[in-house]
Amino acid sequence: MQAILAAEHVTKIYAVHAKETTAVRDVSLDIREGEFVCLLGTSGCGKSTMLNLFAGFTQPTNGRVLLRGQPITKIEPRCGMVFQSYALFPWKTVRQNVEFGPKMQGLPAARQRELADRYIAMVKLSGFENHYPAELSGGMQQRVTLARSLAADPEVLLMDEPFAALDAMTRQVMQEELLAIQEASGKTVVFITHNIDEAILLSDRIVVMAANPGRVTAVIENPLNRPRDLVAQATPAYAALKSRIWDLVVGDVRGALAGRAGRA
Amino acid sequence: MNAVRAMTRSVAIPLFALGRPGGWSTRGSILLLNVLGVAGFLLLWQVATAGGFLSPLFLPSPGQVLNEATQVAATGELWRSIVDSSRRVFFGFALAALFAVPLGVLMGLWAPARAIVGPFVSLLRPLPSITWIPLTMLWLGIGEAQKIAIVFMGTWVYILVYTVESTKRVDPLLIKAARNLGASDLSVMREVILPGALPGILAGLKVSLAISWSCVLSAEMVAAQSGLGALIWNAKDWSNLALVLVGMVCISLTVLVADLAAGVIERLLQPWERHRHG
């Protein structure tokens, strides 16, 4: 089966203050349709760069990024980004934010409203349609962002550590809701995290990345059955998977710490 | 030493009620202090002038000022002056806004426009609007157009600078998000850049509105038949200090009212800021 999203030998070099930094080097990756993939790695491993490349926010220095076999050369609405910092329009109400994608697609007003109502209900924010983002908590704003992306009906959802700023309990609930939404909609999801538990809980496959330069070190099929609730997290299979992933990333984390200490 | 410290503490805390709920920081007591302060000042003024400590040639008494105010109000002269000045401010300010806001948005978005207009902004900004009086009188005479021109010249640069800055400061992440959701250039402009820059533009307009009042008053003091500036300048020539003071109070109140109205419009245009206003 052809990959819906693919990176082919992608290298991205940023020049900041005349100093070149290799964000990712020679990354190749296939994302299958309907799959939930987590990019897992420590800070600086290039996972956000990969997401920005998939969204078309930036272009690879070398290699190609493909959506259904076509190179992504500009900001790509078919790859909807769920931003870590929400990026909601402060001057729009919850409903207007969620209606934004349908409105840009030129759908009739009644249809915009219908879609907004459906996705606002899906993220359990009915009753808050006329609130402005600043009037909501962080967890609620994150849900609005998710609803806004879903209402625009992208083929791929790109999620940049969306739950990193939430407290542990809210995060757990949001993860379960996201899984339910993904299973219901069948959307392909590329999800960034530096949390191993989160990666195991959510993903079909885990792409482990390492820093300096950013690269893929392993791709792990997640063998655990769904639902992966708190009970599943207490099984030996879960513990074995977690320790296998930890072994893959621990060297990189130690290396990064040593590197930072050496520079300081 | 300890006794002194104990005394300061026992006195200072009830007086200033630092950080305590209630005390002198509640709305009611602030209003009370406002009124007491103004009343005390008026009383002091009345005593100083009526008691003969200050000659009425230097400062008329509050009673005389009030008397003068009722007279000019009765003849309609006061009202006419307020309307004339307000009309000049309105047209000059509206022209400046119509010119500077679109230009500012363009400059905020497009660096070449910024580079072309930038030197003119740098050179014109330090010029007080009164320095335009000779040229505008030569070009436009001493009629309405000249007053409006002075207001225009005194405010457009400020409106422009505020607009450029607030347009440049629109969060690029929001523009990215809009494009990611399928927005065209035109939609990004209408849905993101304009509303994003609006708070800064309105703040600039509010500041400039206050400035436009000082422009019109100085223009009216130099050469005008009517308006609040002309009113107090002519009153000075007739040594009618009470009328000068009436004019000054009216200017204060008119600018205050204009500023309050601007605040209301600002809030109506930005309902999403409502949580900040409580």
Image (tube, rainbow, N blue to C red):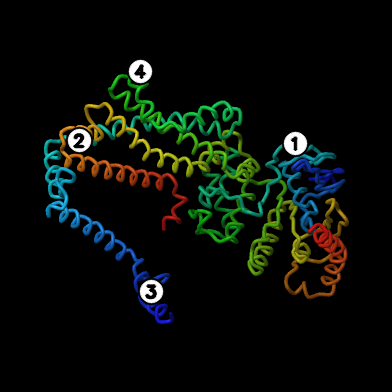
Residue drawn at x 40%, y 72% as measured from the top left: B20
For disc 2, the marked residue is B236
The mark lying in front, picked from 1 and 2, is: 2
Answer yes or no: are tags 4 and 2 on the same subunit.
Answer: yes
For disc 4, the marked residue is B139
The secondary structure type at the circle numbered 1 is loop
Q: Amino acid at mark 4?
A: Trp
Residue B147 quadrant: top left
Q: Residue A149 at x, y = what percent? A: 64, 49
Between marks 1 and 2, how big is the CA–CA gap?
A: 72 Å
Q: Residues within 10 Å of mark 4 (few under 14, many from 20)?
A: few
Q: Earlier in the sequence, mark 4 or mark 2?
A: 4
Residue B202 quadrant: top left
The mark lying in front, picked from 3 and 1, is: 3
Q: Amino acid at mark 1?
A: Thr
For disc 3, the marked residue is B13
Q: Amino acid at mark 3?
A: Ile
Please give the chain letter of the residue carrying mark 1.
A
Q: Residues within 10 Å of mark 3 (few under 14, many from 20)?
A: few
Between marks 4 and 2, how big is the CA–CA gap?
A: 28 Å
Residue A73: which numbered mark, if any?
1
The secondary structure type at the circle numbered 2 is helix
Q: Residue B177 at x, y = what percent? A: 63, 45
Q: Amino acid at mark 2?
A: Lys
